[in-house]
Amino acid sequence: MKKILGILGGMGPAATADLFTKIVSMTEAGSDAEHIRVIIDSNSAIPDRTAAILSGGKDPVPEMLSALRNLEKCGAGCVILPCNTAHFFLPRLRTETSIPILNMLESAAKRCAELYPGKKAAVLATVGTLSTGLYDAALEGAGVPFLLPDDSERETLMYLIYDVVKASGPIAPERERWRGLLDGLRARGAEVFILGCTELPILSEALDVPGPFIDPTAELARAAIEFCGYKVREQKR
Amino acid sequence: MKKILGILGGMGPAATADLFTKIVSMTEAGSDAEHIRVIIDSNSAIPDRTAAILSGGKDPVPEMLSALRNLEKCGAGCVILPCNTAHFFLPRLRTETSIPILNMLESAAKRCAELYPGKKAAVLATVGTLSTGLYDAALEGAGVPFLLPDDSERETLMYLIYDVVKASGPIAPERERWRGLLDGLRARGAEVFILGCTELPILSEALDVPGPFIDPTAELARAAIEFCGYKVREQKR
């Protein structure tokens, strides 16, 4: 039974477009009609998740629920959120709906364990996501050893996420900063990098510095395609 | 007054993702919150438009209306369709809704007149779109001289649109075929190319053969951003 896929998006809009693009390109389909029906609410009015978790910023749940209600009205049979930090609010969202909401962090952790068994993963994420310990739990659950960014690495990550990608700034000049961040983590033992903020795959694909990387957006796309009753194409266009 | 933008999509899904990506990257925004709220129904069940126009294929309007109703339920204040051929059905859709639906072909023709005044434009489109004369009318209305593909060029276009882009096939091997098509049209007097099927900007951007081109998807994005009360950023990321 094929399901309609709902994307509770806008966190941020570029990450939402990235997820949708990955869903389309990763679906095994030989014509328009063989694709998933996808409903998206890219609700840019959802307040910043990191600010809500760490510094008393506005609660994002009411605007997330506004989008969730739209997805329900349109018949979504499954919902996904292209924002790692937003997964902190998943338990509250789940009490509000009977539609299954997939977990991006668990999909990413599972894939990391499959592709890089025993390798140490560095979690690249916002300070909001890191403070929640959500990735720690997902990676421990999947048996993946990991390390977290230190204060200076967190500062670099927040700059790249907020002042470059979310600010629609030019990405190309950030190559050396990005490479430096990865090299520093590698020197501390990292063997694979989890792009644990949905702005980071956008940055990483634009800069093309070697990883290896786990892209949670692509893993969420894969999980959603399968959950909705479609097949993932392994070969990239 | 800011409007919510509705995208009546799925025709095809890759073109819908391309339009959404262009809307996000072309909006002047320094943070998530400064973007347009966008609702998308990528309804892959909409029957093929060219088949409906030319060969008695299933009427696409009922499934287009199903998507339109979803966009209405979610509060869209403006609707756009990322499919040139689907514009044939615009008069029928407009009688069914009070929400303004923008016209991609008129936006493209207007832009062509502005950027390339007096230059002869070649219309690259499906045989469905070409048979309707919709581009002829839009270009005449904007005072743009134009030429249409001949039978063999139409065959090449249908192959590239249906057997490559819509079929999720590899694009890179098509470079010489694409270049040959453009060179042939140039030899017949074309000075600018209108990528008048929403699969063609995807092909053209992947192959990077020189134009110049008018990208109706980008022009529709520009028109929608302005209609919804936002500003277009001129500088690309």
Image (cartoon, coloured by chain):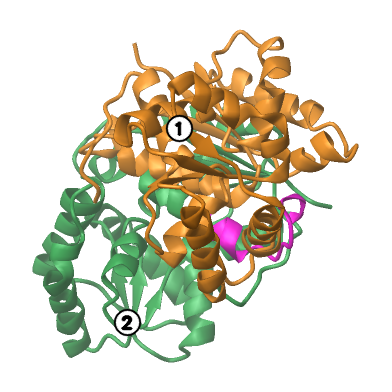
Chain colours: A green, B orange
Task: For label 1, count other residues whose C-alpha is less than 10 Å away and answer few (under 14), some (14-19) or many (20+).
Answer: many
Identify the chain of the residue marked 2, using the numbered disc in the image: A
The range drawn in magenta is: A19-34
Can you see residue A20? no
- Which residue sits furthest right? B56
- Which three-letter amino acid code belongs to the residue tagged 2? Gly
The x and y percentages for residue A59 are 33, 32
The kind of secondary structure the magenta stretch mainly shows is: helix
Residue at 76% in and 55% down: A34
- Picture coordinates of residue B178, whole percent (x, y): 53, 64
Q: Residue A32: within the magenta?
A: yes
Residue B64's disc is none
Q: Position of residue B216 (x, y in %)?
A: 47, 38
Label 1: chain letter: B
Q: Secondary structure at mark 1?
A: helix
Is A156 displayed left or right of B116 in the figure? left
Left or right: A107, with B34 as reference point: right
Q: Would you name the residue on which mark 2 appears?
A: A211
Picture layout, residue B169 above or below residue A209: above
User: Can you identify the residue that label 1 sits on?
Assistant: B108
Query: Which amino acid, mark 1?
Result: Ala
